[in-house]
Amino acid sequence: MITGMDIPAITRKEHEQLIDLIDELIIAIKRLPDDVEWGDVSWAQDMEILDFIRIQTLSLQNAKENAIRGYYRDTFHLIRMIYEAYFVLRLVSTCDKYPFRIRIKRGQHDPSLEHAKKRTIQEAHRAFGGRLVRTYMEDRNTLVAVLRGISVIDSQGQDTGVIVPYYYGAWHDFRPVEYHLRRQGLQDRVPTLRFLTGEWAAFTRRMRKDLSKDYGLIYRYFLTFDKILDNLYLNVILNKKLTTRVLVHYNFLSNFSHSTSDSISLMTTRRITEITSGGLSIVYNHYFSELALLYICHLLSMHLQHATFYLRWRTIKLKNIRRTYQPLCRKVEDDFGYFWFIFNKPHQYDRYTQANRKCNYRKQIFYRPEDIRLGDVRYYDNPLDRLKGLHQTQRELTSGNIFISPFPRDDATFPL
């Protein structure tokens, strides 16, 4: 059993290639702003988004060091924070469609609620014009108008073609301390939201009053994790399958953020800590360290890819994109794409498990891994158990299917 000071040495030895690639990615992201050609006009928002990515990178660097030292619980807890923030980044930086909720109420001249609904839709079309993408009913009394973000106008009153995402304004203006520490008697001192004032003016005073102008609105509709995913779905960044993948990892990583009974027992039953007469000590675990480093590597690649996408979306030139940045992201997928994460493809192992799942021995119906289309492969439930399975050469007796592990380990047949 490897404990204490031996852990960093064995971690670096067993995961040398993965750690080296993580270091390359960290260096590339840190120096990326030096390769940006800003041109004559730059926006404070652009540097703020790049700073967001670099701050995430610093946290991932810290997570890497914790993983190397064997502090797996701390590592996964930190990864969860970074993981969640990645989806915030995607939302606030480039998503230009957002929902605007309108409470429908019958007016004096509305013979029915349906008439009030049609009248409200007409008002929305008049108020928002070309910014209105579509409308739909969220419930019986709530109309959602899907709008595009507001275009930036230059000093001559000309449209610059730049759209600042509405989520950016919400994220920028949200003050979590003022929201979470509010109590009765303090609400009157919460400042009016600047980012909403232009929208409220489009409707009558009664409609404005129906929607609460406070930080709770931002948090409830834009910044809870469920709403972040909903709004990414609205902007076609996620679909149902991708959302499922996101939630699998979010739930897994949450095991290390919450001190539930299961979370505490996970630390002691999976061979990552050892309780002795001398106290509690950490223990090296190949699978925990590998999984943590895989998360870190892929998250770094995803942040780097988004940085290059953001600059392209803003028509800002980036030097060395084909020589440095794109090859690094390809290397992550080529060398460590066996970690089926969010936006990449399943591994042959996943096709093997799906083929076995579809076989019916009683009816003599058999499928081979090569028969399974990538789009039909079911996503896994537990990242740690799947990683362990990847390290096992397996043969399913009833179907005859075989999976040859590219990196078999003798301990993969024992409990983690």
Image: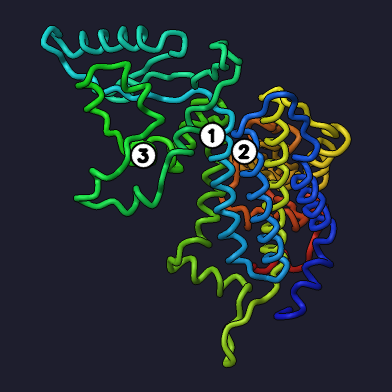
Q: Amino acid at mark 1?
A: Val
Whichever of labels 3 and 2 marks the residue nearer the N terminus, that label is: 2
Residue 87, located in which quarter of the rendered image? top right
Q: Horizontal placement of 403 versus 280: left or right?
A: right
Q: Nearer the viewer, mark 3 or mark 1?
A: 1
Measured as percent of width and height from the top left, residue 43 is found at 62, 30
- Label 1: how many residues lie within 10 Å, few (<14), some (14-19) or many (20+)? many
- Label 3: how many residues lie within 10 Å, few (<14), some (14-19) or many (20+)? few
Q: Horizontal placement of 242 versus 322: left or right?
A: left
| Residue nearer the viewer, 211 or 261 | 211
**Residue lying farthest to the left in this orientation:** 108
Measured as percent of width and height from the top left, residue 107 is found at 14, 13
Q: Nearer the viewer, mark 3 or mark 2?
A: 2
| Label 3 sits on residue | 220
| Label 2 sits on residue | 49
| Label 1 sits on residue | 92
Q: CA distance from mark 3 to mark 2?
A: 23 Å
Whichever of labels 2 and 1 marks the residue nearer the N terminus, that label is: 2
Mark 3 secondary-structure assignment: helix
Measured as percent of width and height from the top left, residue 183 is found at 24, 52
